[in-house]
Amino acid sequence: MHVHTHPAPRGLLRALDRPAREAVELGHRPLRASVAYAAAGLGLVTLASVVAALLDAGQPSLGVPRLDALRAGLESIAIVSPALLIASLYLGLRMALRTIIAGLALGLLTGGFVAASLIPLMAFLSLVERTDAGLQFAMSPLVPTVALISISVVVLRIMSTLDPSRTSMWVGRLFVVLVFSVFAFRFLSHSTFFVLP
Amino acid sequence: MVLSEAQLTAAPMTLGARPEPVSPFVLWSAEDLLPVEDIALAEEDRGLFVHLLQDPDALVKRMLDPTRIQSTLLGSLLVMVSSMSVFALAAGSGIGLDAPGLFRATALLPLNTLLAVAAALGPAYATSILVAARMPMARLVTAMTSALAAGSVILAALSPLPYVLLELDPVWAGPLSLVGSFAAAAMLSGIRVRRTLMAMAVAVRRASLDDPAVELPDEVAHRVGILARMTMVVLAFTVSLSFWAFDALV
């Protein structure tokens, strides 16, 4: 039976589909390419978070500080990413510094795509909230949480592909645990480290 | 091109690397389905930051090259100052310092370390003269600074721990994690000082005798060991006093 196969994707979708190979290639391009990917990802996460905050604005009784989750998520990435870079280098994982930076940038880009893909769901939930069903959803913390999960998944996938050693696996697990620990503690404590409007 | 099952399973495996999981609903080229491995850079193409963390021998080569020693010293200083600042920022915000307090901490912690290195240089140099293992001052400064820079980078890598634990338990776990981070960084710096001095002594001896296989005689290694230990002790003393007296993180 002849099956018409879909051609391999180009551009950003190709980067999202095969992050390990893309991280290696991106690592050999100028650093600004990685920075551009990371900036695009951060922009998408911020956009989705702002949409969630606006949708939550109609539900003040939830008591959720609207951009605190985004702030905590950004803090956790900013604090834990340098630790991942240094640990990978010090322990001699089979990944160059630039490849790990590119991997983090691809993680952010994927997180941005996943966060943006939640916008239709959040709009739908906002409509449901306005009915007589009496349901309420806290959407502000959802977006950064999902983005952090996506970043963690992509980084673990890249690490397990490029260096499947036990050390690499433990570094990856520690990265995930630290990212979510910092996120949880900073979100719960309502820090004033970064002041967002 | 569509790959058969036999072709897919026959894809050559590179040691350690493995194929990346890709979508089974998309047509991939044969190249996309091969194991992925990062291309290692040649030693000279790796930057100082990588050498500081991974390769003390490469660092010694830099120190023995008169055209590179200055850039190695400046780079080590830059890495040390920025790593200490990152740690001060993380630990300071974990403690709950306000914005002026954070600014003070990020400026004072690297300054304390620089002051401590400057104070430790004289005694270390004097020890090198006393044990008949005099090091040229430029190499001694660079060796001590690069070892402290490596320790500072590890300190920056450990910063998420105090950042979280100071929030969780500011009475016990937080301060202990802070002390533990400094202790781990100090231990690494100490190991690195010894390794650098030993590697430098071996490299210079090999160059002197024009024999790439020669090792240090036990008696010479013993003297270099004394110098390394004294350097570690003096550095530990001055750095601890500096952190204690100037209260960077308060």
Image (tube, coloured by chain):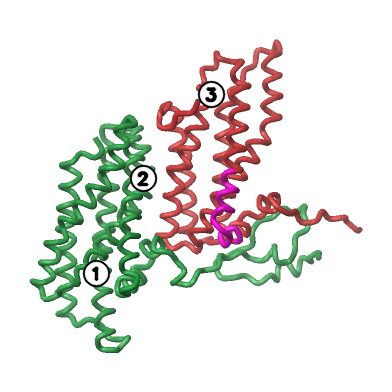
Chain colours: A red, B green
Q: Quadrant of the N terminus of chain B?
A: bottom right
Determine whether, in the image, residue A29 is placed left or right of residue B183. Answer: right
Residue bearing mark 3: A66
- Amino acid on which disc 2 is placed: Val
The crowding category of the residue bearing disc 3, from other C-alpha atoms within 10 Å (few below 14, some 14 to 19, many at least 20), is many
Residue bearing mark 1: B139
Label 3: chain?
A: A
A173 shown above or below B150: above
Q: Where residue B239 sits in the image (x, y, percent)?
A: 19, 51
A76 shown above or below A94: above
Front residue of this view, candidates A118 and B74: B74
Q: Where residue A184 sits in the image (x, y, percent)?
A: 46, 33
Tell me which corner region of the image, top left, top right, bottom left or bottom right, holds residue B37.
bottom right
Determine whether, in the image, residue A193 is placed left or right of residue A146. Answer: left
Query: Residue furthest toward the bottom?
Result: B210
Residue at the location (27% across, 86% down)? B214
Q: Where residue A185 sits in the image (x, y, percent)?
A: 42, 32
Q: Main secondary structure of the magenta part?
A: helix
Front residue of this view, candidates B243 and A130: B243
Residue B2 shown in magenta: no
Q: Say yes or no: labels 1 and 2 on the same chain.
A: yes
Residues at discs 2 and 3 in contact (Cβ within 8 Å): no
Q: Earlier in the sequence, mark 1 or mark 2?
A: 2
Where are the magenta residues, as a range?
A: A25-39
Tell me which corner region of the image, top left, top right, bottom left or bottom right, holds residue B205.
bottom left
Front residue of this view, candidates A89 and B98: B98
Q: Which marked residue is nearer to the observer: mark 2 or mark 3?
A: 2
Label 2: chain?
A: B
Q: Secondary structure at mark 2?
A: helix
